[in-house]
Image: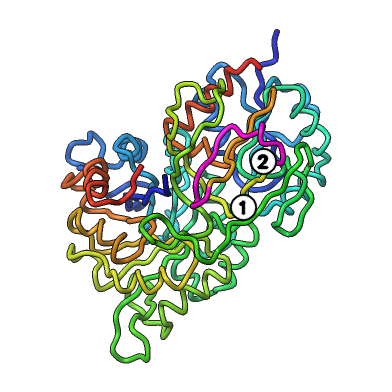
Amino acid sequence: MKNMNIAVVDYGMGNLRSVSKALEHVAPNHTVIVTSDPQLITEAERVVFPGQGAMPDCIRELDMRGLRQVVIEATHTKPFLGICIGLQMLFERSEEGDAAGLGVFAGSVKRFATANMHDAQGQKLKVPHMGWSQVEQAVVHPLWQNIANHERFYYVHSYYVCPEDQSLVAGSTCYPDPFTCAIAKDNLFAVQFHPEKSAQAGLQLLSNFVHWQP
Amino acid sequence: MGLAKRIIPCLDVTDGRVVKGVNFLELRDAGDPVEIAQRYNDQGADELTFLDITASSDNRDLILHIIEEVASQVFIPLTVGGGVRKVEDVRRLLNAGADKVSINTTAVLNPKMVEDAAGRFGSQCIVVAIDAKKVDNQPFEWEVFTHGGRKPTGLDAVKWAQHMVRLGAGELLVTSMDRDGTKIGFNNPLNRAISDAVDVPLIASGGVGNLQHLVEGVTLGGADAVLAASIFHYGEYTVQQAKAYMQQHGIEVR
């Protein structure tokens, strides 16, 4: 029998309940497991790599549990969805604590400038970028299926990724300048926003991921 | 293509029951938290806040079940506040499915708790609630009060807000005790003073009586999000109506 497990990588950084509940909601025929067991991650059909808090802590906790290699391997071998810090960690380096990432992709993670960010109405823009912003889809992709271009998703973050390879970019958001909010390569998709907290649009993206056959 | 201003309905919970809901006469069970949360979600609420007003500490854990139930069916951000005293309380609420936890009186009594909680779980999930009142007997304009607005603290609300952000608050929920329940609008000068003094988002609370008040909360008060209870609970307005009105007045909404 085909393994229908979706592994949500748990490395002890915060609450993964929202992610797992949202996946269960859209994938009633799959088994969603929240796990730090490398074996279960290796065996899973699909892998979701979430993250919250500070990236240096996330990397440290990931390494403490011996998960670095299985996560990197999964980015190359099976449907893989990175969320928030789970996107940021895929890059080489972050300004947050000047930490090294997993280096799956060339590029860095930068912080929004706190001073002098304003919107079109002249209102001060805050950091963290918290709330609902529009996503401009840069490519046609199975994970954007049935999601309108410029749909809003929920964000909460102070850092954003800057990929060196622009062909990775699958979506961007303005705050106030455009930044990369989604990347795609082969079997991998990763987003800065939180699909598990983005109401119908977010559930659609998760559903697309669950049915994705890259 | 900017950031939408958020509309956040606030639900009061006591002894594990939601005591204010959407136009609750219509509901079979006024206390069904999932039904109420789902209805606000369907109306387009950007977030939900649950405020635990349970008097007895014995029954305070009951809110955990509500959050668990809501979080498994409603997929928008959930904030929980009321009676949060220890880092352990924050952990349990987050594990139950809360995305953010709001800390009020304890932030004043034990500011280190804010720092500890932000250090452990990240600033993104720590909201500090500030209840402020205009005063004449201090060298500043607005004073922080605790215990539901009964106890003065001697703290300048603007300076206090800055201090809380330094300790790790990722968002501020500012309630004007002068306006709360009055339906005459937010205290916009208070909100503007705090919003301009910090880099984190500000949620305005206290005093909403009509949709123009929501607009003014953003345009005059500089709020990033507006929180309201009664105008939504009693069916005066839906969240959709609020959003349509704000949009007509040039405010970006989802």
- Position in image of residue A34 (x %, y %): 66, 33
Q: Amino acid at mark 2?
A: Gly
Location of the N terminus of chain B by quadrant is top left
Q: Secondary structure at mark 2?
A: helix
Q: Chain of mark 1?
A: A
Determine contact: label 1, label 2, CB under 8 Å: no
Amino acid beneath label 1: Tyr
* A23 lies above or below B138: above
User: Residue sitting at 76 percent across and 50 percent down?
Assistant: A93
Q: Secondary structure at mark 1?
A: strand
Magenta segment boundaries in residue numbering:
A163-177
Q: Check the picture and name the quadrant holding the C terminus of chain B.
A: top left
Queried whether the magenta region covers residue A167, the answer comes back as yes
Asked whether B12 or B193 is in front, the reply is B193
| Residue at the image position 51 percent from the left and 48 percent from the top | B99
Residue A159 marker = 1
Q: Position of residue B220 (x, y in %)?
A: 28, 66
Q: CA distance from mark 1 to mark 2?
A: 12 Å
Q: Residue at x 37, y 87 (%)?
A: B140
Q: Which mark is residue A75?
A: none
Q: Earlier in the sequence, mark 1 or mark 2?
A: 2
Quarter location, residue A45: top right
Q: Identify residue for label 2.
A: A86
